[in-house]
Amino acid sequence: MPIIRLVYSSTAVGPMSYADLVGIMSPAHEHNRAHGITGLLCYGSGQFLQALEGDRHAVSALYHRIAGDSRHTACQLISVTDVVERDFPEWSMNVVNWDAGSSAHAKALGAAAPSSPDFDPLTMTGGQATQFLRHLAAVERDLSTDG
Ligand code: FAD
């Protein structure tokens, strides 16, 4: 079965606390691991941007389930691509809270979308959104190896 990467954005229905994000992440981690799905979720300024990688059937089914979640609205597909190598192989689920992020996180945005100083997935092209998430993953990896 082909492996795909699906990137979408959405709008949170209300402000998301750290506990709210953990409430999404914990069960998602279990489900994604059981279905061979990897990816990265970024939340900031009331917006979500998520990449999901895995078997096309599993990713499609999950996307439809996520799109029906009442914690967010206006899910918008940004890109769907066949992939040979995953960009986020080590994370069945990882959440970055952009609003609590560091200057290293901001640099990830500057590198991927120089014309967008603010985290605003709605203005990103598919290429920019994917690049942004790749840069963000690199920052997360650096932060985790720094201790
Ligand atoms: P149930 O657990 O039966 O929940 C049904 C509905 O109740 C949900 O759709 C939601 O509207 C609501 N709900 C559930 N829990 C809560 C809560 N704690 N607070 C408020 N309302 C709630 N799931 C994954 O498995 N993998 C992912 O990568 C993933 N990413 C997500 C990203 C975002 C931005 C959001 C908002 C959710 C994500 N989820 C993810 C969760 C997913 O939408 C489903 O809630 C989850 O898969 C469980 O599905 P279910 O049909 O068993 O729903």
Image: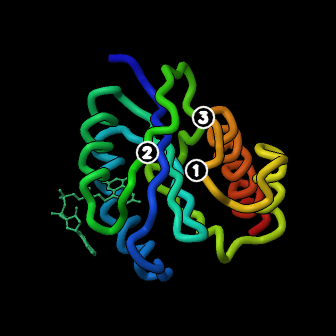
Nearest the eye: 80 or 143: 80
Which image quadrant shows ligand 1? bottom left
Residue under pointer 1: 122
Q: Position of residue 83 (x, y in %)?
A: 52, 22
Residue located 49% across and 20% down the image: 82
Q: Earlier in the sequence, mark 3 or mark 2?
A: 2
Check disc 1: other Cα within 10 Å, few if <14, some if 14-19, many if 20+. some
Residue under pointer 2: 76
Residue under pointer 3: 126
Q: Secondary structure at mark 3?
A: helix
Q: Amino acid at mark 3?
A: Gly
Spatial separation of the CA atoms under disc 3 and disc 1: 10 Å
Q: Are marks 1 and 2 in contact (CB under 8 Å)?
A: yes
Say if 144 sits above or below 76 in the image: below
- Quadrant for residue 145, please give it: bottom right
Q: Position of residue 41 (x, y in %)?
A: 51, 56
Q: Amino acid at mark 2?
A: Gln
- Quadrant for residue 99, please give it: bottom right
Q: Secondary structure at mark 1?
A: helix
Q: Position of residue 23 (x, y in %)?
A: 36, 74
Say if 45 sits above or below 92 in the image: below
- Look at the image and tell me in which quarter the C terminus lies: bottom right
Q: Earlier in the sequence, mark 1 or mark 2?
A: 2
Check disc 3: other Cα within 10 Å, few if <14, some if 14-19, many if 20+. some
